[in-house]
Image: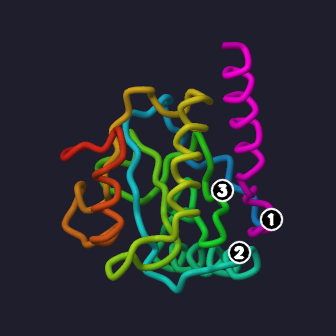
Amino acid sequence: MKLQLALVLCGLTLALGQIVPRSSWCPVPLSPRLPRLVVPVRLIIIHHTVTAPCFNPQQCQLALRRIRADHMRRKFRDIGYNFLIGGDGRIYEGLGFGIRGEHAPHYNSQSIGIAFIGNFQTGLPPSQMLQAAQTLIRIAVQRRQVSPNYSLVGHCQTKATACPGRHLLNELKKWPRWQPKP
């Protein structure tokens, strides 16, 4: 039992190191005026960015800067997602924990948004992306940012959109806490 607990804790400790801090891709710190989330939240909303995929840290960091610039052009306060998953299998901090995102109108105050970098309407994300998202969800629950009895949904379940793509949505339906409604 102690060995199993030690392995679980070790796994979470290693996983925490997989979150690439925002400062590594964005020189602009988050504004202290951004609205905070009341945690733990009850909802995790999955998105895809409908951008080119990225396969290494340099490509992914460039993609993040472009996504943020697009969001700022659209009058968002910053990048809209709490976290993004790169094709390199890394978890990239967007807004991070505790900050209200701008990714799902009517649900932002009760959710975190996780976006997979790429377009998953025509194919499934690579396994390292799926594993990274599952790791991030475990971290979020462990840090008490997300309720242990959270609901997992795709963006299309909160509004009329194809996001997170048909293939990614079908994969999410197999995950333990996926729900047909938010």
Residue placed under numbered mark 2 in the picture: 61
Q: Pick whichever, 120 or 5, lies toward us.
A: 5
- Magenta stretch containing residue 15, yes or no? yes
Query: Can residue 78 be seen in the rendering of this structure?
Result: no
> Whole-percent x and y of residue 84?
57, 62
> Whole-percent x and y of residue 50?
43, 80
> Whole-percent x and y of residue 134?
52, 48
Is 45 situated left or right of 23 in this image? left
- Among numbered discs 2 and 1, the one appearing first in the sequence: 1
Q: Is residue 122 above or below residue 64?
A: below
Label 1 element class: helix
Label 3 element class: strand
Q: Is residue 93 above or below residue 135?
A: below
Q: CA distance from mark 2 to mark 1?
A: 8 Å
Residue placed under numbered mark 3 in the picture: 93
Q: Residue at x 67, y 62 (%)?
A: 90
Q: CA distance from mark 1 to mark 3?
A: 9 Å
Quadrant of the snapshot with the C terminus:
top left
* Amino acid carrying mark 2 in the image: Gln
Q: CA distance from mark 2 to mark 3?
A: 11 Å
Q: How is the image coloured?
A: rainbow
> Whole-percent x and y of residue 154?
31, 57
Residue placed under numbered mark 1 in the picture: 24
Magenta-highlighted residues: 1-27
- Among numbered discs 1 and 3, the one appearing first in the sequence: 1
* Secondary structure mostly taken by the magenta-highlighted segment of the chain: helix
Marks 2,1: beta carbons within 8 A: yes
Q: Residue at x 40, y 72 (%)?
A: 124
- Magenta stretch containing residue 66, yes or no? no
* Amino acid carrying mark 1 in the image: Ser
